[in-house]
Amino acid sequence: MSKYLIRRLLGMIPLLLGISFVVYALLNLVPGSPTDQYEFNPTIRPEDRERIIENLGLNDPWYTRYFTWLGNVLQGDLGNSFLNYAPVDSAIMSALPNTLILSVTSLLFALALSVPLGIISAVKLNSFFDRAVTIISTAFFSIPSIWLGLLLIIMFSVQFQSWGFPSLPTGGVRDLRGDSGFLDRVEHIILPAFTLGIVQLAGWTRYVRSSMLEVIRQDFIRTAQAKGLKERAVLLGHAFRNAMLPLVTLVGLTIPDLFGGALIVENVFSYPGIGRLTVQSLSASDYSVAMAAIMILAFLTVIGNLVADVLYGVMDPRVRFD
């Protein structure tokens, strides 16, 4: 196991370097510049704009600036924002916890519902419950996150408030008008977590159902039933564990979807996370902040896949890493 982990961790280095090079090239080759905001500003003279470009090093070729950026990152310096000159690491550290909380919440929400729904749907094959779960999961799997988020805001925030019902916040992570407690944070995360996790919930429910149907038809399940074991013990002790093995890998592979979906969901709900920070920095051509945010998402994605592979080996003793 230790040799496998070392080998995988070492393999992440060239992978992340390649990602950083491609992303930096794309950011600097697309039209736009951090100094475009000064071009039509009457208070900024052309020579002042040229001096700002020179101070930011934007006159150098992009590949030269990439190696300068990489050298600074290896020394722990993420640089400063091109817009407000604030340290990039402070912006990242203020946004990253919010994204992690949102992603973990949506992940737990999807797992907590998809596993029992998939198991019950498989056990009650072709029943009304099974057909209802299949239809609803297919519908939710097909709904775009941006449309669902706007629909939830209209229903549970706008309409509920007009009807006099308790309404949920439309955005942010806490109420700025008073003290923010735990319940206030929970209220603010309900809608974005539901929007982000509903696609995984729908997909995982169908996957668990299919996996359980395949397992419960195996010979070892019929043998366990023939021994007189209770149905609950057969399902949970034998079928469930074997059916969940592929789900572990599936969850690890969908972690990138969670962080990718956060780019949309966080902007719909004005949620101050890495996704919203990335979109804002890209819109303003703030290369330093955009690079840091994108590389954080890439690093979390690679680590998520590694964790999924390790958990698969832990749950299935037949898997050998060495």
Image (cartoon, rainbow, N blue to C red):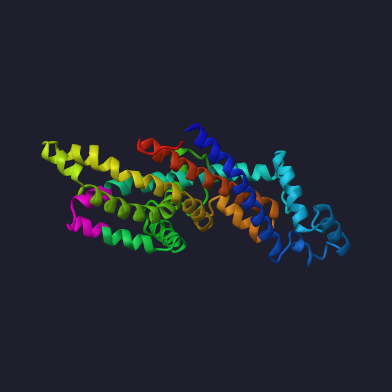
Q: Is residue 191 magenta?
A: no
Q: Name the image quarter holding residue 126.
A: bottom left
Q: Position of residue 61 (x, y in %)?
A: 79, 58
Instruction: Identify the magenta region.
Output: 117-133
* Residue at image coords 28%, 54%: 210
Q: Position of residue 291 (x, y in %)?
A: 65, 52
Farthest residue in the front direction? 322
Majority SS type along the magenta span: helix
What residue do we see at 64% from left, 58% from top? 282
Figure label count: 0
Locate residue 7 relative to residue 288 in the image: left or right.
left
| Whether residue 226 is situated above or below residue 202 in the rendered picture | above
Instruction: Name the residue rendered at 74%, 43% in the picture.
Output: 72
Left or right of 290? Residue 205 is left
Rendered residue at 49%/51% (across/down): 256
Q: Residue 152 in the image: x percent, y percent?
A: 41, 58
- Please tell me which residue lies in front, 226 or 77: 226
* Horizontal side of residue 299 vs 41, given as left or right: left
